[in-house]
Amino acid sequence: MLPNAGSLEGKRVASANQSPPTVVVSGDGDRLALAGALEIVTLAEARNSLQKWSKQGSSRSLDVAGLDRLDTPGALFLCGLRDQGVKLTGIRAEHRALLDLICGLDLKPLPKVESVPHWRQLVIQLGKGAHQARHDVIDIITFVGRAASWTVSALIHPECLRPASISRHIAETGMHALPIIGLMAVMIAVVIGYQGVAQLRPYGGEDFTINLVAVSVLREMGVLITAIMVAGRSGSAFTAEIGVMQTREEVDALKVMGIEPMQVLVVPRLIALVITLPLLTFFADMMGLIGGAAISQSLLDVSPLQYLTRVRQAVSGSDLFVGLFKAPVFAFFITIVSCMHGLRVNGSAESVGRETTRAVVKSIFLVIVLDAFFSILFERIGI
Amino acid sequence: MNVRAQAHAGPILSARGIVNRFGTQVVHDKLNLDVVRGEIIGIAGGSGSGKSVLLKTLIGLRQPDAGEVILNGKPVHAIGAAEKAALIGVLFQQGALFSSLSVAQNIMLPMREHTALAAGEREQIAAMKLALAGLPADSGIKPPSALSGGMVKRAAFARALALDPRILFLDEPTSDLDPVSASGIDALIRSLNQSLGITVVIVTHDLTTLFTICSRIAVLCDRKITVDTADKLRKSEQPGIREFFRGPRAEGAMTARKSSHGN
């Protein structure tokens, strides 16, 4: 955020005033005099000229009667000279109060921040990271448990459900995400289609591009793209919303009123996203197939009707099911991670940003790890 | 009042015909306000009377819908960035210390931007400003989040003073503070005004601050402003002003004024 101060300094100082204040040093080496303005902008100049003059002889006395303007850094400078044994003469009445105030301050240098060697920093960071990771795992497990128990209790006692809140979250995470997710699904299908045609053509199997697109979109890409998009879009919104509520003590206010934050903040989001993500995934699947139809028409000269027949032969119901099955699981973990990080915000604006970043990174990571896990699982059980 | 401050004639700040509107709601209707060099002037008014909007207008953060603010002889919007930084210091209500920098770095930031001082000198000056604001030197390396409410105000004071401004704007300097810290801040404002000759504009509804340290008070009431001394305002028969200055809290604040002036 900070611009490079060095390159700007000269220019800024010059433009500080239309007639820049100046300080003049005169005298014969033994008795020096300062005149003009001794202010923060002329301080460096005054110090340099005084050093030049004092080289010619040791000056023990400085006449400051000619100073028109003096500010606190100037006064601090004069106090420093006085402490070195220089006698200040001819102090004006209006400057005396300022000098007395500044010289009377009990000044201590700013303490230095101890610098840690690089290798030790690495070790410290490694330790902190491991500690943090352990806490994260415990936190996630605890949070999963609490969220699950509150969700179940809300489902058992439907009067505790908050339909207004749930429908708002469904609209925000679902309806508003439709355009972007549809576009992404079409694009992914186009990308896979192009690669498929290019790779399969040498073997004369470019017709199998349709199988490739349909199966990969339905089984993997549709749900994966949707989950990643939702994690970035809605997961970050969850963390930021809850985080800002945390900084403004709204979460504490809920607790004081005897309302469990889990119940009003986490459960509605959880239910909403578990409903939304499978629907969004189905939408992405359909859009992906439409993208596939477009690419077949333009690259393979396969008409949409023929394309539909090929797709029906290529995919089975289980392909669609495998994709849709994963969606609620992803939704569950995205919500858990985002809400957990939202509740971890500790009050500063910085921590809202930090926790949001962590939530998004962690939920996308979890989505991909879980997807790999599901791939292996479905392979083993033969779906 | 300090001689340095009186060296230039004329008001340091002059607002003429200020109109501020939000939609159809008029907050300020052709306000005039002059701030004399070296004085401490309080801007008072109930909640929602537009105190903060007026402050934003005076420091040039908000363009008024009509009227003009003249600061040190120039329209406020025509003053260059560096000149403005050297001319005005602002203490924001929540301190507005940058949370990513330490307290000392906060104070050194304007110096780093606008002066050619070496790092060592900047640190020396920052330590001096901390001491001026009544903070210990070791608070300089702390992040703002590690400070208490009173210390945040003092640190924000030190930063507002970083370039020795001619005029200091304080937005609710004593709000959210315990009485001891609030009195400490009042004393700090008065001593800075007397020793450095800084003109101070305080926006507050703290009656004790208004009565004990302000030489004049500007009351915002019904979209208009009335400027006078505390004693004369207390005799005013205008309903809004009378309510403001004659409640039980006002009596308590007047007692504080008598005792502080007696010392």
Image (cartoon, coloured by chain):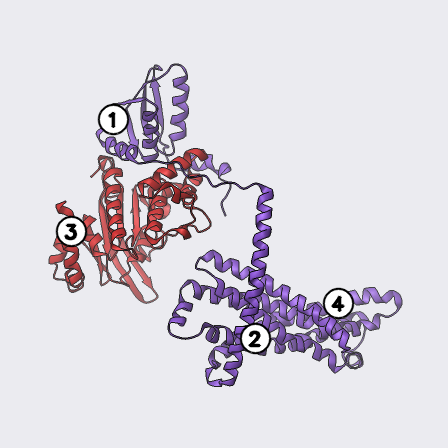
Chain colours: A purple, B red
First along the sequence among labels 1 and 4 = 1
Q: Nearer the viewer, mark 1 or mark 4?
A: 1
What residue did someone put label 3 on?
A: B257
Nearer-the-camera pick, A252 or B60: A252
The alpha-carbon separation of the residues under discs 3 and 4 comes to: 80 Å
The alpha-carbon separation of the residues under discs 3 and 1 comes to: 35 Å
Pointer 3 chain: B
The secondary element bearing badge 2 is classed as helix
Residue at point 58% right, 60% down? A134
What residue did someone put label 4 on?
A: A192
The secondary element bearing badge 4 is classed as helix
Name the disc covering residue A91, or none: 1
- Taking the image as shown, residue A231 lies to the left or right of residue B108, namely right
The alpha-carbon separation of the residues under discs 2 and 3 comes to: 61 Å
Q: Nearer the viewer, mark 4 or mark 2?
A: 2
Please identify the quadrant where the C terminus of chain A is shown.
bottom right
Residue A29 occupies which quadrant of the picture? top left
Q: Nearer the viewer, mark 2 or mark 1?
A: 2
Residue at point 27% right, 60% down? B28
Q: Amino acid at mark 3?
A: Arg
Q: Are marks 3 and 1 in contact (CB under 8 Å)?
A: no
Q: Is residue B71 visible?
A: no
**Picture coordinates of residue A273, whole percent (x, y):** 56, 75
Q: Amino acid at mark 4?
A: Ile
Q: Are marks 1 and 4 on the same chain?
A: yes
Q: Amino acid at mark 2?
A: Leu
